Image: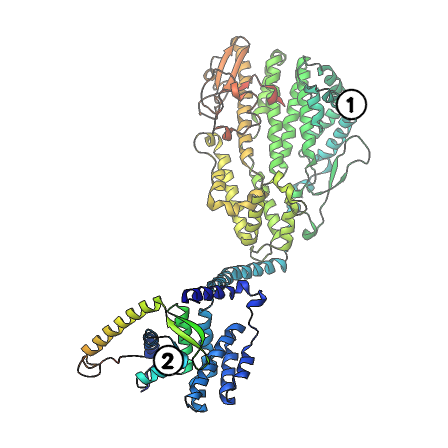
């Protein structure tokens, strides 16, 4: 399923922050995780991912560091900052409120009756 | 290395990689994004797409390297995971759009110094650039346009002179008279200067030195007790033929001198140099500014009037009342001839000459009253009473013409009386204040800020705006003149208030610099009226004394037989004060402090003739303005 750009613009950063809240990740890893865990709903290419990461970095929500992976390849790892953790808490609250509102008017199934909000995990 | 230490080093690196430290050679990465891409070994389709994206970002070298490394790592991870080349290329996105998004995001990451610089540059561009643009348009408009003067104000002012017959003009006789006086006086003046210089070197100081160093003219010494009196009388006898020429000239209708800025020496040789005005060119554009016109007759008339006043005093002392009255009549005629002159300075000289006549009459009556018959006194009263009691309208008209002439030579003409300043206009103004050649000199004659404010006003105001400002100002001056003594009694000066108001200041800068100040003129006019009324009162007192055998105790007994009205005190509106002493009557005004000090000058002594009365009102000195007997300063 293809998500409208505006929806993606709102959901993408929160999803990325959520993924990074568990562990440091590099770009391709993030793309894979998003695609896999959201069943392709939040799948994004490099064209969307990297501008988003640079913006989050500019806002101080994440920080990056070039490191050599176990395979010997150099990768840029992204990690959540303290500011990023705070933002993630705020965004999560906002999304939950939104989901409740959408359920109340019948756009989403009430929690417990179906999958509800997709949970993201590493 | 601990995580904290790594982060600290990372921050230091970030700072070092900002704009400020770009010149440091060791902070530059030797790898370029192109070499990194070439070494990555990506398939051509993928590498080509990465290359195009990175190239299109137009970021800095270091930033492009960063983006290239990240995209390469991503592509390799995807290829290693079994994604086919086409899908990898597709995931990279449309190069132009992706490059723009990356560029925008990377710029947000830049150091705050860079953002500050962008903000400053944009702010400057938003404010300075429009200002420069406006200034450029204004400068271009000024530089490439020219005035086109059309109105021949010289012809207008000189028309009455050109209509006179030669035998109606006094000017030819005045030049001759001046020439004759200088022939006698110049050697004496030269000798006085030499002696004065020697005596000044010996730290001496007296009236003779003062006169000698005054330079231009000899001031006749009227006090018979003065050691120079006899010497001055001897000089008077020598210049008597010249004074006869003056009397003949004064009997003619007008001075008849051409108003012009051009002149040639009246005589090639001789002790006194006299400027002979010659006509301006017929072409208005070739003419000089109207306000540059020369007035060589003024110094002559001032000099003649002093000698004639001295002649009157000497004649009275000798009992020759006829000659004394004749000399006073001649002084009054000299003043009347100046009525036809086209400017304020001429009018101020005219009232100074009239005042001299009034004070001389007072001096003669004070010292030699019995010399004058009843008819003589009546004749003197007649001469004094016919003096102007208000500034002629022509004076203000000619000042307006002079300003309009400046406008027509400085501004463009759109055919409807409007226009803007030109390069020639600024040059003209510059030549008038002479600040181009030596800015340091400006401060001595004129506040530099007022010059710069005037330049700004000239650049931004239109010709009609300035013309209107000059008319408004002159109308207020007219109302101040018409108000008479009321200006000292709470009304104040409407023209001064307008000058001081913020609303009027900007447009008035050029007006006030190019039109002479009328504050002093109004004050001089009022002082002149007081002096005239005082002189008439003195004559009336003397007539009353002869009829009744005693001095009048008040002006009331003189009205209306000897005086039409009691003379008015300018500060109170009440009659001037009269006090009878053993030496005779004392006539005085209570002065700016409005307090009757019994006819004692006090702090006002010797100051009234030179100081501005309306300025004195702000911090009035103690004392009365004693009009009769007249002081020495009043006579000069």
Q: Is residue B93 something one can see in this rendering?
A: no
Query: Residue A30, labelled with which disc?
Result: 2
The residue at the point 66 percent across, 22 percent down is: B309
Residue B205 vertical position relative to residue B441 in the rendered view, above or below: above
Tell me if A116 is positioned left or right of A54 in this view: left
Determine crowd level at label 1: few under 14, some 14-19, many 20+ residues with C-alpha closer than 10 A. few
Q: Tag 1, which secondary structure?
A: helix
**Is B337 rendered above or below residue B105?**
above
Task: Tell me, for residue A70, which label it has, or none.
Answer: none
Where residue B114 sits: x, y (%)?
49, 64
Outermost residue, front side:
B1
Of badges 1 and 2, nearer the viewer stands 2
Q: Nearer the viewer, residue A103 or B68?
A: B68
| Mark count | 2
Give residue A16's position: percent from left, percent from top: 35, 76
- Identify the element where label 2 is drawn: helix
Question: What chain is tagged by disc 2?
Answer: A
Q: Nearer the viewer, residue B233 or B389?
A: B233
Which residue is pictured at 73% across the width and 25% down the height?
A: B244
Q: Is residue B233 left or right of residue B496?
A: right
How was this image coloured?
rainbow
Residue B450 vs A4, above or below: the answer is above
Question: Image height check: is B585 above or below A109?
Answer: above
Which image quadrant is residue B385 in? Answer: top right
**Disc 2 residue crowd, few under 14, some 14–19, many 20+, Cα 10 Å:** many
Mark pair 1, 2: CA separation: 110 Å
* The one of B623 and B521 positioned closer to us in this rendering: B623
Residue B490 in sight from this viewpoint? yes
Dot 1: chain letter: B
Q: What residue would you read off at disc 1?
A: B191
Quarter holding the N terminus of chain B is bottom left
């Amino acid at each position: 399923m293809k998500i409208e750009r505006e929806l993606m613009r709102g959901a993408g950063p929160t999803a990325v922050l959520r993924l990074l809240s568990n562990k440091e990740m590099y770009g391709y890893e993030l793309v894979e995780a998003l695609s896999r865990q959201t069943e392709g709903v939040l799948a994004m290419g490099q064209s969307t991912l990297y501008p988003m990461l640079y913006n989050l970095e500019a806002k101080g929500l994440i920080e990056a560091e070039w490191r050599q992976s176990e395979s010997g390849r150099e990768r840029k790892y992204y990690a959540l900052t303290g500011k990023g953790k705070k933002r993630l808490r705020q965004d999560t609250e906002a999304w939950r409120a939104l989901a409740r509102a959408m359920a109340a008017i019948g756009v989403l199934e009430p929690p417990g009756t179906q999958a509800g909000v997709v949970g993201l995990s590493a | 290395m601990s995580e904290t230490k790594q982060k600290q080093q990372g921050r230091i690196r970030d700072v070092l990689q900002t704009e400020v430290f770009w010149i440091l050679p060791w902070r530059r990465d030797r790898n370029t994004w192109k070499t990194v891409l070439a070494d990555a070994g990506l398939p051509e389709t993928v590498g080509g797409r990465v290359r195009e994206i990175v190239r299109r970002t137009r970021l800095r070298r270091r930033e492009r390297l960063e983006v290239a490394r990240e995209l390469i790592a991503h592509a390799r991870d995807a290829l290693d995971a079994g994604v086919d080349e086409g899908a990898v290329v597709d995931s990279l996105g449309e190069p132009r759009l992706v490059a723009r998004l990356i560029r925008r995001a990377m710029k947000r990451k830049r150091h705050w110094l860079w953002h500050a610089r962008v903000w400053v540059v944009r702010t400057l561009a938003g404010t300075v650039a429009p200002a420069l643009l406006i200034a450029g348009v204004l400068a271009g408009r000024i530089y490439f346009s020219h005035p086109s003067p059309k109105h021949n104000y010289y012809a207008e002012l000189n028309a009455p002179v050109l209509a006179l017959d030669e035998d109606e003009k006094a000017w030819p006789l005045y030049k001759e008279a001046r020439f004759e006086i200088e022939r006698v006086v110049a050697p004496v003046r030269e000798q006085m200067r030499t002696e004065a210089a020697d005596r000044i070197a010996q730290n001496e100081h007296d009236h003779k030195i003062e006169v000698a160093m005054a330079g231009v003219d000899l001031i006749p010494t009227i006090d018979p007790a003065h050691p120079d009196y006899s010497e001055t009388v001897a000089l008077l006898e020598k210049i008597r033929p010249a004074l006869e020429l003056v009397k003949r000239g004064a009997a003619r209708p007008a001075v008849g001198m051409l108003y012009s800025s051009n002149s040639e020496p009246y005589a090639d040789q001789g002790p006194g140099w006299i400027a002979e005005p010659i006509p301006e060119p017929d072409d208005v554009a070739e003419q000089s500014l109207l306000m540059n016109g020369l007035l060589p007759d003024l110094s002559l008339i001032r000099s003649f009037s002093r000698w004639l006043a001295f002649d009157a005093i000497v004649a009275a002392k000798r009992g020759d009342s006829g000659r004394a009255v004749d000399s006073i009549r001649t002084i009054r005629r000299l003043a009347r001839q100046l009525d036809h002159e086209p400017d304020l300075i001429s009018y101020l000289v005219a009232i100074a000459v009239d005042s001299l006549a009034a004070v001389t009459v007072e001096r003669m009556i004070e010292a030699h009253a019995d010399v004058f018959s009843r008819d003589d006194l009546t004749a003197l009263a007649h001469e004094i009473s016919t003096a102007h009691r208000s500034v002629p309208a022509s004076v203000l008209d000619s000042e307006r013409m002079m300003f309009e002439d400046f406008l027509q030579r400085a501004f463009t003409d759109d055919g409807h009386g409007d226009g803007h300043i030109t390069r020639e206009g600024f040059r003209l103004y510059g030549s008038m204040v002479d600040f181009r050649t030596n800015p340091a000199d400006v401060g001595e004659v004129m506040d530099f800020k007022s010059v710069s404010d005037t330049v700004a006003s000239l650049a931004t105001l239109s010709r009609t705006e300035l013309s209107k400002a000059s008319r408004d100002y002159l109308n207020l001056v007219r109302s101040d003149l018409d108000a008479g003594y009321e200006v000292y009694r709470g009304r104040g000066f409407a023209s001064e208030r307008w000058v001081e108001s913020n609303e009027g200041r900007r447009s008035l800068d050029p007006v006030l610099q190019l039109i002479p100040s009328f504050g002093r003129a109004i004050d001089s006019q009022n002082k002149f009226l007081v002096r005239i009324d005082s002189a008439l009162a003195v004559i009336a007192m003397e007539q009353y004394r002869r009829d009744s055998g005693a001095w009048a105790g008040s002006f009331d007994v003189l009205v209306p037989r000897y005086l039409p009205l009691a003379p008015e005190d300018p500060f109170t509106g009440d009659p001037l004060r009269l006090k009878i002493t053993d030496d005779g009557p004392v006539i005085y005004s209570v002065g700016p402090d409005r307090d009757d000090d019994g006819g004692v000058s006090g702090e006002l002594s010797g100051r009234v003739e030179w100081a501005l009365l309306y300025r004195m009102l702000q911090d009035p000195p103690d004392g009365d303005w004693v009009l009769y007997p007249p002081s020495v300063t009043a006579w000069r």
